[in-house]
Structures are given as structure tokens and as C-alpha cells.
Image: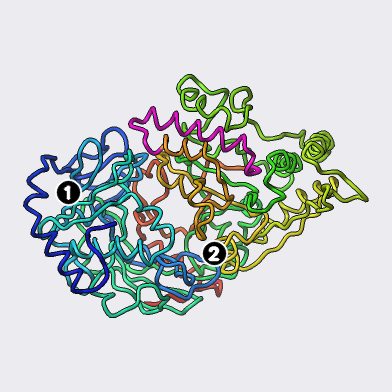
């Protein structure tokens, strides 16, 4: 727990005065040189005197409106608590201590913090705040704000925050602008970077407001934008802060070029696609191969006013899958899970539904050097051998590969293999229905949030029906879906886990025992496996890039061979469609798309507006 106890204002003041009184001794013992950034492993790509990221244009003109889409609805401007549905784009309001570079696997550079200190063992980290960092009301961002944010998020924020910051022992003020955060001694190289990502909230703003309640009062921030106007559930508009304190911070130069950022809400993805073609918003990242192949047509597309582009993805694609809820007894036997996977015919699906655009996923860290392949090498075996009696034997003897077919739609061979596995697990077909000795059926529901997945799930369900398993599909609105998933109220969902190129503490939230019963966690599967916890620790404690790759590949193997999911597919490109009114820097970032480094070409925008008006599809934008 922190040395700063949030029991009452007097106690907080006393704690702060004690921390400040001890500042001399805190600082005197430390001989660490301050730096401008932190790399997870290796060296930083940008030196201390860098002027801007290579994928930004510091001379980009400011102005215009960027309109983006959002699905569903919202009823709150507080994204940090479990209650309510927060509005899209709220991250634009707040700054953190550091900000990430998209040119590196995992490096952060000072934002609110002008400098960072940490020892070689990373047992603590200290941040010195910039003297000119300000809230939108002109008040300075203080050390007290940092401490209050940390303690409030742990105490009243989403359960994730208590878990994420559990290794923090104390946060202490050391002078007017320096804060030192001490960890519990666990070997965890990522902790200083995690603290750099801490959302910093204004303590003085919340003194008369309950933090743990939903609210549609526009909150006070320190970031590049603030809320200008909103219609709950329909749209929210952010305006660029003209006197934004951080506009000349090197990591910000050339970014946040739009005067207004507007989010328009749509009922579902299909309606949103039509909204793009009607000019109701500007940029769409397309996740549907069918839409990409067939739905982008019409005058605006044909004339080049809407541009389709595929941008190569250098970052990992992670795992998308049919995900089992292991909290359901019927899915607790790995033979059952493996058997069900034989009923998914990817090759037929890819050819007939996806226009051949996808590749089968066979790793939780797909499209990166972190993905396992072949058999474990010597370094991996050093991690896996001590766990041999806790992990599937196939980890040591077989190369993992999802089941395959010839794509003809004739899946009899795989279904026979599935039925043999089900028999071994105690399930037999009686009267056309698969049951166990207790007379229980293996029927289940696939919970969906998008109608797009109904056409994909239906052939899978049809194959399962041939095994005597009856699958229902239920598509519900985003708010209901989020609520049910956070409470683990589902049998099977389409689960996805995006992965960075530098995995770390988030793996505990994905697969760790402690997260399995914590509502709102990302351990959607309900995994409770000590061997996996051990491998997660190896990932987190890796002291070099080589050690990180080794530990991640070992973790990947064990996740795969437990058959927790039925892997689906991935694409090595991002498909993006946008109205042709934008310019962007010559260099795209290596590991993502930074739309806030783009800017509007005023001449192109005028032409686009004219085209939209001519067709009667002109959009109205809050000015």
C-alpha cells in the first residue's frame, strides 16, 4: 500500500507533509542519472535531444474535423470505473507521465514527466514533472495529483487497476515536482513503464465530486482535447485545446492536428459502413473480408473520393478465436475442447466466406517473432522441463497445428476424429443427441455482438449438429454483451487478445489464476493453471529481449496445447478506407496506425464537401 493514505483530507495532508519532510533523505541516497525515456529491453531509438517522432510532421497544418465511428451507445464520461458505458475518445482528454513510441516494440518517452530515474534492478522509479504541465483550468499538474490518481484507481477504479498496480509498495513526494514509486522487490522490468502509463487525474476537481459514479459532466483534463459538445448515445465532439501545455513536447510535435474530433454512434457495423459511404464519418478500419471485397462500391468509391488502402502490419496480430468458458463444467475436459475444434472448417470458410483473404492463426502471438513454431529449443526446454508433469505431453513431442481440411466442405474425417475424442471423454450419441453418463447434453450457446459472425458460426454449428451437439447463436447489443462478458455469463464467445511485441504484466490479466474469478478481467477463459502462471512470471522477469522471446514462445505452446480456444484467422495487413481529404507523413509508424499524425488538406476537404452536398449526403458537423 502507498504511504499516502486516502482516508481523509487531514490525514492526506499529514502524509504529504511527512513525505516532503523526508525528501532530502529520499533523494540523497539515490545516484541514478535522469533520462528522457525508458526502453523495455535494449536502447531507445530516439536520443535525448530528439525533436519529434519519425512518423510525424512537425510542420503539419492545424485545422478541420476528423470524424470517427463508434458502435452502440454511452452514458458516462468516466472510463475508469466498472459502472456505465464510457464515451469513445476519452483518452484524448488526459495525459500520462510518459507516452509510447510506435517505432519500437516497447519504449516510452516523457510527457507530463520531463525526466525519469530508475536503478538497474528497476526496484523503483522516479518521475520529475514538467514545470509547465497544466490542467485545462490553468492549475498545475502536481505530485499530489499523481499520488491521488494511483490510490484512487486502485481503490475505486476498475478491478483491473488493483491488479495492475499491485506491486506498488508506496508512492512518495520528493520535493515539489518529483515523485518516487517503490515496488515490492518482485523481478518485473515492466513496472517503471507501467507507471509511466498511469492516467493522471485532477485531485482538486474530484474533491467535491464522487469518482466512483457515472457522470455526463465533461471532466477536467490536461490533454490535447476537451469535450465541446455531446448528445448521449448519438455523438461526442472534442475540441483541440488552443493553449495546450504539451503542444511542444517532442513526443507530441506533429500530432493532434485536427481542430475537432467527432465520434458518431451507429447501431451496428453494417449501418456504420453505410454511414461511411454517406459521408457521415471519415475513416474506417474494415474487419470484414466480405465487406472489403464486395461492399465498397458506389459513386464516391468509384470516383476515388473514398480511398481503400491496405497497410502492412508489422506488429503482432494476437489471437482471435471461438473461446470456451472453462467455468462451464462441459468445457473443462481438454479432449472435449479439442474435439469441438475439429468441427470448424477454416479452409471452406476462408474460400467461401472470406474470399481467400485470411491465414489460419496458430499462435497466441501470431505474426511476430514471439510465436512458437516447431519443437521447443534448448532455452525453452529449460523453462518447460520443470513443469513437465503439469502441461500436455504434446508440448514436447508435436508441432501445434489447428485441424485442416481440403476446403470441399466434406469434413467427415475430422468429425470422426472429434467423435473418437468425445467418446474417450465419456460422451456418446443417444437418439441423435450427444450426452454423458449423467444424461447431460453438450449443447451450448455462442454469444455474439456482431451479426457479421452469424454467417461464420452457422456452418460451425451445422458440423457440430452432425455430432449430436446443438448450438444456438445469440446476437445482442454492445452494452448487454459487455455486461455479460465482464460477468463471464456465456458459454462460447468470439474472444480476441491483441498482443504487443513486448508482452508483460497484461498476461496475468489474460491467463493468470488470480484474474480468473475477478469480474471485468481479460481472463475470459477462466484459466487456473499453475504452470501457465509460472511461465507468465518468466515472461515478466525476462532480463533481455532474447529471454523474453524464449519465455513467450514457451507460454504460447502451453496455451495452445491446452486447447482453450479454437483459433480463427488473421490478416498481415490493416484494411482502411477513408475520404480523400487527408495527408500524412512520409513514414508510417512501424507498429500501428497513428491517425492523429494525419492532417487535413483544406483544398481536398472543400472538394469532398462539395461531392457530398452534390449527392445529397452532406454531413453536418458541430462547429
Q: Which mark is residue 366?
A: none
Where 572 falls versus 399 (above or below)?
below
Quarter of the figure that contains the C terminus: bottom left
Name the image quarter holding residue 266: bottom right
What residue appears at the point 49 percent right and 57 percent down from the top-left corner?
Answer: 578
Q: With 368 as the anchor, is 439 left or right in this view?
A: right
Where 483 falls versus 98 (above or below)?
below
N-terminal of the pair, mark 1 or mark 2, is 1
- Near-viewer residue (423 or 104): 423
Q: How is the image coloured?
A: rainbow
**Spot occupied by residue 125 in the image (x, y as percentages of width and height):** 22, 47
* Mark 2 surroundings: few (<14), some (14-19) or many (≥20) residues within 10 A: many
Quarter of the figure that contains the N terminus: bottom left
Q: Which mark is residue 115?
A: 1
In this rendering, does residue 3 appear at all? yes
Q: Which residues are magenta?
A: 540-568
Residue that carries the numbered disc 2 in the rendered image: 276
What residue appears at the point 19 percent right and 49 percent down from the top-left corner?
Answer: 126
In this figure, what is the number of numbered marks? Answer: 2
**Spot occupied by residue 328 in the image (x, y as percentages of width and height):** 67, 53
Task: Find out whether residue 544 is within the magenta segment.
Answer: yes
SS state under label 2: helix
**Spot occupied by residue 124 in the image (x, y as percentages of width and height):** 23, 45
Where 178 falls versus 232 (above or below)?
above
In this rendering, does residue 305 appear at all? no
* Mark 1 surroundings: few (<14), some (14-19) or many (≥20) residues within 10 A: many
Query: Spatial distance from mark 1 to mark 2, Cα to Cα?
Result: 43 Å
* Dominant secondary structure, magenta: helix
Q: With 132 as the anchor, is 341 left or right in this view?
A: right
Amino acid at each position: 500500500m502507498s504511504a499516502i493514505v486516502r482516508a481523509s483530507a487531514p490525514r492526506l495532508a499529514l502524509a504529504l507533509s511527512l513525505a516532503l519532510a523526508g525528501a532530502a533523505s529520499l533523494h540523497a541516497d539515490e545516484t541514478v542519472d535522469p533520462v528522457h525515456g525508458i526502453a523495455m529491453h535494449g536502447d531507445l531509438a530516439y536520443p535525448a535531444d530528439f525533436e519529434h517522432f519519425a512518423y510525424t510532421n512537425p510542420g503539419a497544418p492545424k485545422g478541420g474535423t476528423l470524424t470517427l465511428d463508434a458502435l452502440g451507445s454511452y452514458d458516462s464520461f468516466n472510463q475508469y470505473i466498472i459502472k456505465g458505458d464510457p464515451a469513445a475518445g476519452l483518452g484524448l482528454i488526459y495525459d500520462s507521465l510518459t507516452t509510447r513510441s510506435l517505432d519500437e516494440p516497447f519504449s516510452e518517452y516523457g510527457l507530463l514527466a520531463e525526466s525519469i530515474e530508475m536503478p538497474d534492478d528497476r526496484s523503483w522509479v522516479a518521475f520529475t514533472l514538467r514545470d509547465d504541465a497544466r490542467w485545462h483550468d490553468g492549475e498545475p499538474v502536481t505530485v499530489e495529483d499523481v499520488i491521488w490518481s494511483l490510490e484512487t484507481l486502485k481503490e475505486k477504479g476498475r478491478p483491473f487497476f488493483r491488479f495492475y498496480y499491485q506491486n506498488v509498495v508506496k508512492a512518495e513526494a520528493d520535493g515539489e515536482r518529483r515523485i518516487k514509486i517503490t515496488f515490492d522487490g518482485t523481478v518485473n522490468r515492466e513496472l517503471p513503464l507501467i507507471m509511466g502509463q498511469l492516467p493522471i487525474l485532477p485531485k482538486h476537481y474530484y474533491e467535491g465530486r464522487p469518482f466512483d459514479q457515472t457522470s455526463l459532466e465533461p471532466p477536467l483534463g490536461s490533454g490535447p482535447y476537451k469535450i465541446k459538445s455531446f448528445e448521449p448515445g448519438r455523438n461526442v465532439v472534442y475540441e483541440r485545446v488552443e493553449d495546450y501545455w504539451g503542444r511542444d513536447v517532442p513526443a507530441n510535435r506533429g500530432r493532434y492536428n485536427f481542430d475537432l474530433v467527432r465520434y458518431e454512434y451507429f447501431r451496428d457495423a453494417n449501418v456504420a459502413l453505410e454511414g461511411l459511404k454517406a459521408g457521415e464519418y471519415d475513416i474506417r478500419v474494415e474487419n470484414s473480408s466480405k465487406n472489403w471485397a464486395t461492399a465498397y462500391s458506389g459513386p464516391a468509391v468509384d470516383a476515388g473520393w473514398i480511398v481503400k488502402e491496405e497497410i502492412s502490419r508489422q506488429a503482432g496480430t494476437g489471437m482471435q478465436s471461438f473461446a470456451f468458458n472453462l467455468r462451464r463444467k462441459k468445457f473443462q475436459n481438454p479432449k472435449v475442447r479439442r474435439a469441438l475444434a475439429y468441427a470448424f472448417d477454416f479452409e471452406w470458410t476462408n474460400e467461401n466466406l472470406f474470399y481467400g483473404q485470411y491465414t489460419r492463426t496458430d499462435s497466441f502471438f501470431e505474426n511476430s517473432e514471439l510465436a512458437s513454431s516447431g519443437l521447443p529449443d534448448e532455452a525453452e526446454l529449460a523453462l518447460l522441463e520443470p513443469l513437465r508433469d503439469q502441461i500436455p505431453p504434446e508440448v514436447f513431442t508435436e508441432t501445434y497445428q489447428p485441424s485442416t481440411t481440403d476446403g470441399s466442405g466434406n469434413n467427415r474425417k475430422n468429425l470422426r476424429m472429434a467423435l473418437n475424442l468425445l467418446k474417450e471423454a465419456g460422451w456418446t450419441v443417444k437418439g441423435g443427441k450427444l450426452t454423458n453418463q449423467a444424461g447431460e447434453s453438450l449443447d451450448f450457446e455462442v454469444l455474439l455482438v456482431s451479426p457479421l459472425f452469424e454467417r461464420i458460426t452457422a456452418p460451425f454449428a451445422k458440423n457440430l449438429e452432425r455430432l449430436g451437439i446443438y448450438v444456438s447463436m445469440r446476437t445482442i447489443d454492445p452494452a448487454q454483451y459487455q455486461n455479460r462478458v465482464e460477468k463471464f455469463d456465456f458459454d462460447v464467445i468470439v474472444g480476441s487478445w491483441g498482443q504487443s511485441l513486448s508482452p508483460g504484466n497484461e498476461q496475468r490479466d489474460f491467463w493468470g489464476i488470480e484474474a480468473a474469478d475477478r469480474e471485468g478481467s481479460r481472463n475470459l477463459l477462466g484459466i487456473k493453471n499453475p504452470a501457465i502462471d509460472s511461465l507468465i512470471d518468466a515472461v515478466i522477469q525476462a532480463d533481455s529481449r532474447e529471454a523474453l522471446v524464449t519465455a513467450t514462445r514457451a507460454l504460447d505452446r502451453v496455451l495452445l496445447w491446452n486447447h482453450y480456444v479454437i483459433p480463427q484467422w488473421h490478416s498481415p495487413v490493416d484494411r482502411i478506407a477513408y475520404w480523400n481529404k487527408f495527408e500524412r507523413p512520409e513514414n508510417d509508424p512501424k507498429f500501428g496506425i497513428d491517425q492523429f499524425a494525419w492532417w487535413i488538406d483544406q483544398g481536398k476537404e472543400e472538394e469532398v464537401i462539395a461531392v457530398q452536398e452534390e449527392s445529397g449526403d452532406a454531413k453536418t458537423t458541430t462547429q
